[in-house]
Amino acid sequence: MKKIAIFASGSGSNFQAIVDAISSDVLTAEVSLLVCDRSDAFAIKRAEHHSIPYFSFDPKNYLSKLEYEIDILEELQSRKVDFIVLAGYMRLIGPTLLKEYEGRIVNIHPSLLPAFPGKDAIGQALAAGVKVSGVTVHFVDKGMDTGPIIEQREVLLVEGETKESLQEKIHLVEHQLYPSVLQKLFTMNEVGGSKK
Ligand code: GRF
């Protein structure tokens, strides 16, 4: 069974959806660790509630990304983590983790990439006046939301759509899509013969 580490910076509703999908056998995996760059993130409360270990760090206490990623890597390796699942983690992944986990880091983004990468994708979509936005699950590379796309789902915008209403619709889609994409990915990975 794949051991995953979920990286989050905020509410962690996607973290919750993944934990719930595992409980209800929609996803076969073990959440071995939550990695969080904010000690006040609600995601940590969720991890505590489910007795999932977490590693929380303050980037300000480190000289550089290199330094904190070395600490993260140590946490991941000591728990034999197979996959890194980014879920609202507001930082770019650096070379240390990219090298060790090449092809085994995924992210979920609230737009149809390559449209609206980076921060506030929902606000960007509204400002652009699009009628269709959505959700993308993709592999992570060194760029900002630029890695190869795995799956996408459309979300339609209605008249009078607000940031809150669109975010709610996007979250509903994310909570279903992310566990199902992970399940496919992990199954393929096993069939491919790599026991990593
Ligand atoms: C999600 O919309 C995700 O697409 C984006 O950040 C948000 C995280 O939400 N990367 P949550 O913390 O999982 O509730």
Image: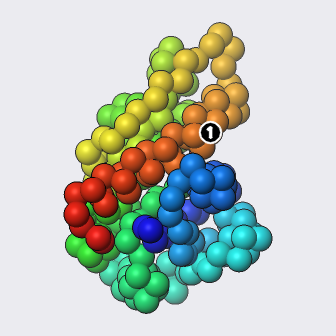
Q: Position of residue 1 (x, y in %)?
A: 44, 68
Q: Position of residue 129 (x, y in %)?
A: 51, 17
Q: Position of residue 180 (x, y in %)?
A: 49, 44
| In the rendered image, the vertical position of residue 177 relative to residue 125, given as above or below | below
Q: State how many labels appear.
A: 1
| In the rendered image, the vertical position of residue 171 relative to residue 145, given as above or below | above
Q: Using residue 88 as the reference point, say whether residue 10 is left or right of it.
A: right
Could you say which is closer to the camera, residue 106 or residue 146? 106
Does mark 1 have its CB less than 8 Å from ligand 1? yes
| In the rendered image, the vertical position of residue 69 relative to residue 84, given as above or below | below
Tell me which corner region of the image, top left, top right, bottom left or bottom right, holds residue 98.
Answer: bottom left
Residue 12 visible in the displayed image: no
Tell me which corner region of the image, top left, top right, bottom left or bottom right, holds residue 66.
Answer: bottom left
- Residue drawn at (66%, 53%) of the image: 24
Q: Position of residue 108 (x, y in %)?
A: 46, 47
How crowded pointer 1 is (Cα within 10 Å; few <14, some 14-19, many 20+) is rated as some
- Residue drawn at (51%, 59%) of the image: 28
Could you say which is closer to the camera, residue 113 or residue 119? 113
Could you say which is closer to the camera, residue 173 or residue 182? 182
- Determine whether the residue tagged by mark 1 lies in a helix, strand or loop: helix
- Residue drawn at (55%, 75%) of the image: 33
Mark 1 — residue?
171
